[in-house]
Image (cartoon, rainbow, N blue to C red):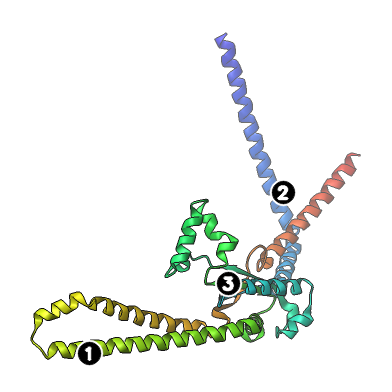
């Protein structure tokens, strides 16, 4: 029984070794035939490669796509208004309404592609100096996943910064696309009136703060003169502890800090939709964009080899029949 098993094992190993040898020989034959094929068709293959590369370069230049971004801050509660205006603009692009695009000042409207607006998710900016926003996030997070909450459409629209993305088929400039889009977004009489009143309120608040700061300074100067004019150090301690002098100093510090924040706000509130930064002419290389000069030559070569293989197969089958 063990002798038969040993003989069978030797036969199996011999067959495996023979098959490996045949496979290796077939591979060498295939390599040799490939070399002969290239040798016979070398000039034609080179011509196809050059033609394909030239066509690819042309297509890369002709069918180029450039991405652009505008980072904006919608002010005075105008976020929903901005999203609605961008949706309207995209619908006009889908309808190929070049008249509308030209009316709002977009030059080369036929070269203008899709446009969209998305929030820049920044939870820390959202809750900074705003206790009510922090409480809102905290409340919503109790009933669900915090990641889904911060990316929720309702929540994300309340983030301070948003990015408007659009594409063109040619290199663009701020004059041709960015400025017309910003003018289009800022064209609202309602929000301009709201802006005017908002800025007036800030100016009133700043003047009131300055008045209070001046009164505090006058009070402090008067106290300093009174304290320096007498040598009653024990009364100084008594005065400090019983007239809430520290609270007065804290009030002034808070007012000075608030004045600084209001001055910074004035910089970003000069427009209904404030543009913070612009990124232009980032060439789109996703998918086959910009890669046709590499793909077309190999596509031509593959098609040529496929056709030659089919012809050879057809002739062999015709000879057999």
Residue 63 visible in the snapshot: no
Q: Position of residue 113 (x, y in %)?
A: 71, 73
- Give SS at disc 2: helix
State the image quarter where residue 17 is shown.
Answer: top right
Q: For mark 1, what is the residue? A: 221
Q: Position of residue 182 (x, y in %)?
A: 62, 82
- Residue for point 65% across, 69% down: 290
- Give SS at disc 3: strand
**Marks 1/3: CA–CA distance:** 50 Å
Q: For mark 2, what is the residue? A: 33
Q: Nearer the viewer, residue 138 or 267?
A: 138
Q: For mark 3, what is the residue? A: 163
Instruction: Using the image, determine if residue 221 lies above or below residue 144.
Output: below
- Residue for point 48% across, 67% down: 126
Q: Position of residue 224 (x, y in %)?
A: 18, 88
- Residue for point 63% across, 74% down: 82
Q: Earlier in the sequence, mark 1 or mark 3?
A: 3
Q: Position of residue 39 (x, y in %)?
A: 72, 57
> Looking at the image, do the residues carrying marks 2 and 1 touch, with CB atoms under 8 Å apart?
no
Q: Is residue 320 left or right of residue 7?
A: right
Q: Which residue is the extreme one toward the right?
A: 321
Q: Earlier in the sequence, mark 3 or mark 2?
A: 2
10 Å crowding of disc 2: few (<14), some (14-19), many (20+): few
């Amino acid at each position: 029984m063990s002798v038969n098993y040993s003989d069978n094992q030797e036969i199996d190993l011999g067959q495996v070794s023979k098959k490996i040898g045949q496979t290796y020989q077939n591979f060498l034959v295939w390599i040799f035939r490939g070399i002969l094929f290239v040798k016979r068709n070398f000039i034609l293959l080179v011509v196809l490669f050059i033609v394909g590369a030239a066509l690819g370069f042309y297509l890369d230049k002709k069918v180029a796509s450039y991405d652009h971004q505008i980072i904006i801050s919608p002010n005075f509660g105008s976020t929903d208004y901005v999203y609605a205006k961008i949706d309207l603009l995209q619908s006009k692009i889908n309808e190929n309404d070049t008249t509308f695009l030209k009316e709002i000042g977009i030059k080369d409207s036929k070269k203008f592609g899709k446009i969209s607006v998305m929030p820049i998710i920044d939870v820390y900016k959202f809750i900074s100096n705003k206790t009510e926003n922090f409480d809102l996030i905290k409340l919503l997070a109790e009933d669900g996943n915090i990641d889904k909450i911060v990316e929720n459409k309702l929540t994300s629209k309340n983030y301070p910064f948003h990015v408007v993305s659009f594409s063109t088929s040619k290199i663009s400039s701020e004059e041709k696309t960015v400025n017309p889009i910003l003018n289009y977004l800022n064209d609202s009489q309602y929000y301009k009136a709201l802006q005017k009143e908002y800025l007036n309120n800030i100016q009133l608040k700043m003047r009131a703060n300055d008045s209070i700061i001046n009164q505090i300074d006058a009070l402090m100067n008067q106290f300093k003169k009174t304290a320096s004019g007498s040598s009653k150090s024990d009364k100084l301690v008594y005065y400090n502890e019983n007239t809430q002098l520290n609270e007065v100093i804290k009030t002034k510090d808070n007012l000075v800090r608030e004045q600084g924040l209001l001055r910074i706000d004035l910089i970003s509130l000069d427009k209904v939709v404030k543009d913070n930064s612009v990124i232009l002419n980032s060439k789109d290389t996703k998918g086959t964009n910009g890669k046709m000069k590499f793909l077309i030559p190999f596509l031509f070569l593959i098609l040529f080899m496929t056709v030659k293989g089919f012809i050879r197969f057809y002739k062999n089958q015709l000879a057999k029949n």
